[in-house]
Amino acid sequence: MRKPPLFNLGSWRSLDGSGGGSVLRLPANHLVTHGVVVGMTGSGKTGLLTVLVEEALRNEVPTLVIDVKGDLPNLLLSFPSFDASTLAPWVDVNGAGESETAASLAEQLAHERRDALAAWSLGEPELRAFAAGTEVRVLTPGAAAGELLHVLSPLEVRSNRWDTDPDSARHALSAAVSLVLRLLGRDSDPARSREHVLLSILAERRLLAGQNAELGALMQDIVAPPIAEIGALPINSFLRKSERQHLAAALNALLASPTFASWRQGVPLDVGAWLTPKNGRTPAVIVSVAHLDDEERALVLGVLLEEVLSWVRTLRGSSRLRALVVFDEVFGFLPPHPANPPTKRPLVSLMKQARAFGVGVLVATQNPMDLDYRALSNAGLWSLGRLQTDADRHRVLDGIATNDADRTEKQLHQTLKRLAPRWFVMRNANASSGPILMQPRQTLSLMRGPMTRVEVRAAREARVGT
């Protein structure tokens, strides 16, 4: 049997700081049991995430990245050389001296990157191989900065899953209907919204019959229902005709809105197609929702994660890492009971089930307090950066502790309190050793912080032109 690939994450030493700086190589299949990265702002969490994604791609593991803050599109800035001219558009000239120009700053940055990567035995050959072997895409739902994403395709475009796995198709439909109702300013809760129930039943009727359920057609069904009852009630008792007419009018106004058109255009939600390598390149698909408000993010990502879960369930069982799903800043999307945002159900299911199909889930947050640790207890790999408060440290240590020998809570508590930036405590349940200290290697991609929509567009265009 072929040995699993090894991810070159950086260096490690013992928890007490002894042991030099041995190279840390993580077997890829250790991420099949999922991972969690926690650290306050400035701890280097995004850098570690980027290294993990880069190593997955270098080892031909397709990766889906959910980006909430705007940092992960930095993966577009993976240049094939240290040529300063490619860096010039991305240097920060604010605060530069009078004699410094973008060109001179780019030259300086190129030398700094060359030296930083050389310290990890990485150079232009590795940069060229990474750029040539990967295909990085950025999807921006509702905005044209990246590729547009047809977020409502689970509703408007019939999937074959209605024939093979109707339960998962129904969950994806429910998430899409919730998004539509949120955009209408109406109750989007599947459990209590009568409008959600009506739209779901009408859409499902069409989809089960082999048709699409486009919003225009659903609007006609709302006005002239093709069904007589919903549950045990006549349809006019369930939702009066006047109420249905108001709903249809609101849908019509939404359909006429130029802004809404962007939610119904672009790449269909097809995770399997996204993560299929093409032309010898391993795909990294970044779904960036940094430009959306909190509720829109939850609804859009709920639709996306239902699709991810449905795709995972179509795969054959595997113990090797065949794909990686990365969620940067999961705070608010995986809260403890009783909170139940649309992202929680598919995330919990992925943490429980995806490992059987060779799909690893990697989540990260800078705020560990409001997370469902029952779901995260399924994770085998924990990387803990500096945490600012005692409450944060105790919360995380309670989450990862399994027995007194592994715990060494007092030592870990003090270590987390004084960790320097870009250092982490790593606990790997798949390894025989206890917690270690690790320092991530330098990223191949240029890390310049959150990218604006204008910058994402410019980076995409530059990458296509190379």
Image: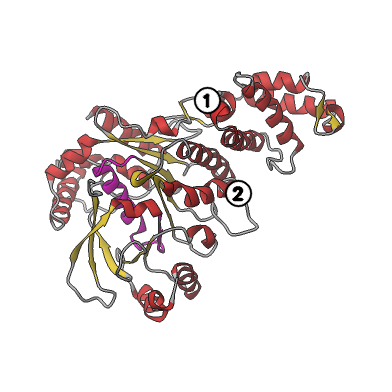
Of 142 and 440, which appears nearest the observer? 440
The location of residue 314, given as percent across then percent down, is: 46, 35
Q: Is residue 45 left or right of residue 246?
A: left
The location of residue 116, given as percent across then percent down, is: 17, 56
Of 76 and 87, which appears nearest the observer? 76
Residue matched to label 1: 160
12 part of magenta stretch: no
Identify the magenta region. Answer: 34-62
Label 2 SS? loop
Quadrant of residue 247 within the rendered picture = top right
Confirm whether residue 114 shows in the render. yes
Residue displayed at 68% across by 40% down: 188
Label 1 SS? loop
Confirm whether residue 92 shows in the render. no
Q: Residues within 10 Å of mark 1 (few under 14, many from 20)?
A: few
The location of residue 86, given as percent across then percent down, is: 20, 38
- In the rendered view, tell whether residue 337 sits above or below residue 154: below
Type of colouring: secondary structure
Of 282 and 439, which appears nearest the observer? 282
Residue displayed at 67% across by 35% down: 181
Which is nearer the N-term, disc 1 or disc 2? Answer: 1
Q: Amino acid at mark 2?
A: Pro
Looking at this rendering, what residue extends furthest in the front direction?
A: 1
Q: Is residue 30 left or right of residue 395?
A: left
Q: Residues within 10 Å of mark 2 (few under 14, many from 20)?
A: some
The disc label shown at residue 445, or none: none
Q: Amino acid at mark 1?
A: Asn
Residue displayed at 54% across by 45% down: 346
Q: Is residue 399 left or right of residue 421?
A: right
Residue matched to label 2: 341
- In the rendered view, tell whether residue 378 sits above or below residue 144: below
